[in-house]
Image (spheres, helix red, strand yellow):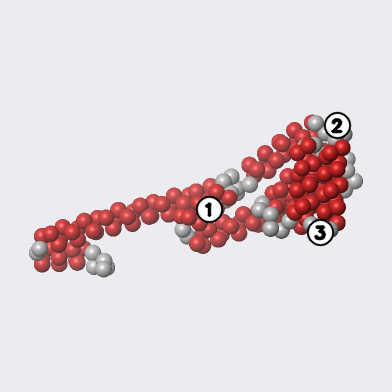
Amino acid sequence: MRGKIAAALILAAFIAGSALAQPSAEAVKRKMAGNEYQKRREYAAAAKQYLAALKLEPAYSDVHYNLGILYFYRLKDEPRRYEKALYHLNAYRLLDPGAEDLETVLAHVRQSLEKIDAIEQGEYQEAILSGTIKSLQDFLSRNPTGYYADDAKRQLKILRDYESAVKRRQSKIQSAFRSALAAKSPEQMEEFARLYPDEP
């Protein structure tokens, strides 16, 4: 997660460098359309319009603000919504450092960070409790640089090593069983049973 945040801050700083120009008429039109969709509670359509405006004008601070608030409060089914909210709110903060609502924006930035951490922690606990290689791989694919990524990699290595050891032991037992069968000797079968009393 921290890698994503750093990348978002760098990109937002880059955007801030190009913030001097006025937005194009088409970008303004897209923003206004997004506002209309928001009034009608058509939040996905509003986000689409705002994103189109940012494609035209990446330094459009008002649109970053609108998108940040939209992701934070309204787009509840959007994957990684708090990371997206954090990105847009940070972009707004950097593009308009003198904004009157800066304290509110900073509060949303802090809350977004807390939500991101809580979600990642919950996903990690779920992966650990599941205790499977797949659950840890899935967690790492979603959080490759997150706070818990290194620990997840260690746990994944432990599980893979254990799985390899189990496979090696099963292979050894099967080989010993085949040898005992091939010998056609009761003594060999008794020896196998003595060595591996818990095997079916």
Q: Amino acid at mark 1?
A: Asp
Residue reaching furthest to the right: 100
Q: Nearer the viewer, residue 175 or 23?
A: 23
Would you say the residues marked 2 and 3 are in contact, meaning their CB atoms lie under 8 Å apart? Answer: no
Q: Which residue is mark 3?
A: 41
User: Could you say where residue 34 lies in the image, as x and y percent from the top left?
Assistant: 82, 49
Q: Local crowd at mark 3 within 10 Å, few (<14), some, or many (≥20)? A: few
User: Could you say where residue 15 lies in the image, as x and y percent from the top left?
Assistant: 77, 35
- Mark-to-mark CA distance, 2 and 3: 31 Å
* Residue at position x 75%, y 54% in the image: 44
Q: Nearer the viewer, residue 108 or 19?
A: 19
Q: Nearer the viewer, residue 2 or 170?
A: 170
Q: Residue 95 appears in which quarter of the rendering?
A: top right
User: Could you say where residue 94 lies in the image, as x and y percent from the top left?
Assistant: 80, 39
Q: Which residue is mark 1?
A: 138
**Element on which disc 3 rests:** loop
Residue 90 in sight in this render? no
User: Could you say where residue 105 lies in the image, as x and y percent from the top left?
Assistant: 82, 49
Query: Which mark is first along the chain, 2 or 1?
Result: 2
Q: Which residue is mark 2?
A: 21
Would you say the residues marked 3 and 1 are in contact, meaning their CB atoms lie under 8 Å apart? Answer: no
* Residue at position x 9%, y 64% in the image: 185
| Relative to 98, residue 183 above or below | below
**Element on which disc 1 rests:** helix
Q: Amino acid at mark 3?
A: Arg
| Relative to 128, residue 65 above or below | above
Closer to us: mark 1 or mark 2? 2
Query: Which mark is first along the chain, 1 or 3?
Result: 3
**Element on which disc 2 rests:** loop
